[in-house]
Amino acid sequence: MTKIKKLTKITSSPFLFILVIFIVFVILLLVFSGQLILSQSFYIGPLSIHYYGLIMALAVGLAWILARRRAQKFGIDVKTADDIIFYIILGGFIGARLYHVFSSTNYYWQHPIDILKVWNGGLSIFGAVLGGLVAIYIFKRIITPPSPPFNRGGEWVMNWLTPSLIVGQIIGRFGNLFNYEAFGYPTNLPWKMFVPWQFRPEQYQNANFFHPWFLYEQIGLIAIFFIISRLGKQVKGDLFIYYVLLYNILRFALEFLRIDSVFFGNLRLNSISSALLVFLAIVLLITRKKHEKPA
C-alpha cells in the first residue's frame, strides 16, 4: 500500500511532467538531426499498429479526461459529459477526414481507396471543429431534449470543451512527426528538421532539412492554452470565440511556411479558411459586446 501511495504521489507531481518533457526534447533532437529515423508502425503478430493512430487515440483520451474533470464546473454530470464527448469525437473525426478529402479531390479521385487510410494522416482541424459543432447541434436537437448544459446555449458546451480541444491539437500534432508530414520549406536554421527522402516532395529531393511546421503550431497552441486559461471567467461565454480568433491568427501566419498547403487558385485554402474565421470571430465578439447587458 505504501508503494502504491508513493507511485501515486510521483505521477501526480511535476516530476512526471518534467520527465515527459525531457524525453520528448531528446527524441526531437535525435529526429531533427537525422540520427533517429522514426518508423510509422510496428507489428503485434500479424497486426500492424500505426503510431499516428496511437497518438490520435492518446490525444482524444487526454482531451476526454480533461473535459470530464471540468464538467462539474459547468453543471454537467459525468454520464451526460461522456455522451456529448462521444458524439463530438465521432462528428469531429468524420468532419476532419471529409474536409481533407474534399480539399484534395484530385488525388482521392484517382486513389479512392486511400480515403479509408486515415493512418497515413489527413485529419483537418477545420473539419474537426465543424464536425464537432454539427454533432453538438444533432445531440441538442435530436438525441436529447433541452436540459443542462444545453439550456444555457450551445456556446456553453463549447466553452467547456475549448481547453480539451487545444490539448487534443497539441498532442495530435506529434502524429505528424511520426508520419513526416506537415513540415515547412527547406531551411538551415538551428532547429531544422531532417526529413527522409521518401517523404520529401519531388521538387525538394535534394534538400535534407525543413521547417518543423508542426512544432511551430504546437508552441503557438501552448501559448493559446495559457491565454485561454488566464481569460477564464473574464470573457464569460466567449471562450470558444477567443480560441477561434487566436488559433486562426496563428494558423494564417504559419500556413505560408507549410510545404503541402492545398491551393485554391493562387491562394492557400487553409489561409482563406483562417482569414474568414478570424473575421467571423471579430464580428461575433463585437456583436456580443454591444448586446452585453451593463452590470
Image (tube, rainbow, N blue to C red):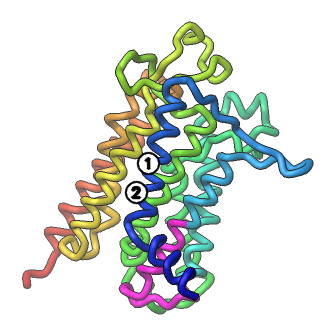
Residue 50: image x %, image y %? 73, 46
Amino acid type of disc 1? Phe
Foreground of the two, 262 or 80: 80
What residue is disc 2 on? 18
Q: Does 107 lie within the magenta span? A: no
Residue 95 placement, left or right of 240: right
For label 1, the SS is helix
Q: Residue furthest top?
A: 206
Residue 214: image x %, image y %? 46, 38
Region of the chain picked out in magenta, as a range: 62-80
Residue 195: image x %, image y %? 56, 23
* Residue at (60, 55) in percent of width and height: 95
For label 2, the SS is helix
The answer to which image quadrant residue 287 occupies is: bottom left
Residue 261 placement, left or right of 103: left
The answer to which image quadrant residue 212 occupies is: top left
Q: Quadrant of the C terminus?
A: bottom left
What residue is disc 1 on? 22
Q: Residue furthest right?
A: 46
Can residue 267 be seen at all in this image of the molecule? no
**Picture disc at residue 103:** none
Foreground of the two, 159 or 139: 159
